[in-house]
Image (cartoon, rainbow, N blue to C red):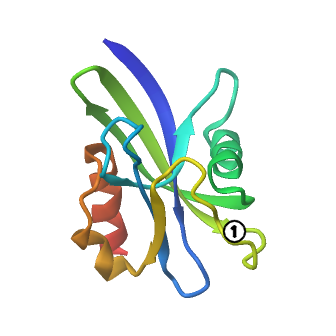
């Protein structure tokens, strides 16, 4: 089975809200929520991959903080290893754009449970609650 290493950003704003991204109908797992990010390319560190992916997907630059979770999840067609990190926008006046996702939403930690998360992202949501 194919294995893929990916990264996700738990992007926190000045109001301590977290950016949640709704997967579009063109993506696998459409209509599920995730933390934005993407695949780690060969020779790339997870942090460099996360900065690159967030620039491509959201049009913003970030600083990458501490690792939250290192999760391996087996989907029917692929095994995904997801590394999630806390992150902050370098310029808080730039508004993230949903270049690939159906929509983006800033939510408080206590609101995350109301969303239907992609399975690989659930352990990260659970860890954020414990903070």
Say what secondary structure mark 1 lies in.
strand
Up/down of 10 relative to 111, above or below:
above
Pinpoint residue 39: horizontal percent, then vertical percent: 55, 33
**Residue reaching furthest to the bottom:** 15
Residue reaching furthest to the front? 25
Q: Which percent across, then down, holds residue 3?
A: 40, 19
Relative to 63, does residue 43 appear above or below in the rendering? Answer: above
Question: Where's residue 24, x and y in %?
Answer: 41, 47
Could you classify mark 1 by the number of other residues whose Cα lies within 10 Å: few (under 14), some (14-19), or many (20 or more)? some
Residue at 61% x, 85% y: name it: 14
Instruction: Note whether 23 is above or below 90 in the view shown.
Output: above
Residue at 40%, 37% (x, y): give it.
27
Please say if 11 is above or below 93.
above
Q: Quadrant of the N terminus?
A: top left
Residue labelled with disc 1? 89
Is 103 on the left-hand or right-hand side of 48? left
Residues 27 and 34: in front is 27
Would residue 128 be found to the left or right of residue 5 on screen? Answer: left
Name the residue: 35% across, 35% down.
28
Quarter of the image where one finds residue 122: bottom left
């Amino acid at each position: 089975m194919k294995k893929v290493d990916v990264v996700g950003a738990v992007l926190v704003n000045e109001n301590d809200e977290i950016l949640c991204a709704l997967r579009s109908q063109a993506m696998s797992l459409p209509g599920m929520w995730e933390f934005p990010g993407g695949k780690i390319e060969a020779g790339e560190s997870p942090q460099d991959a996360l900065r690159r992916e967030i620039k491509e997907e959201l049009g913003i630059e970030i600083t990458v903080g501490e690792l939250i979770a290192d999760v391996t999840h087996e989907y029917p067609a692929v095994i995904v290893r997801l590394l999630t990190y806390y992150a902050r926008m370098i310029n808080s006046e730039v508004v993230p754009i949903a270049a690939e996702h159906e929509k983006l939403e800033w939510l408080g930690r206590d609101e995350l449970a109301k969303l239907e998360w992609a399975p690989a992202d659930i352990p990260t949501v659970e860890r954020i609650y414990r903070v």
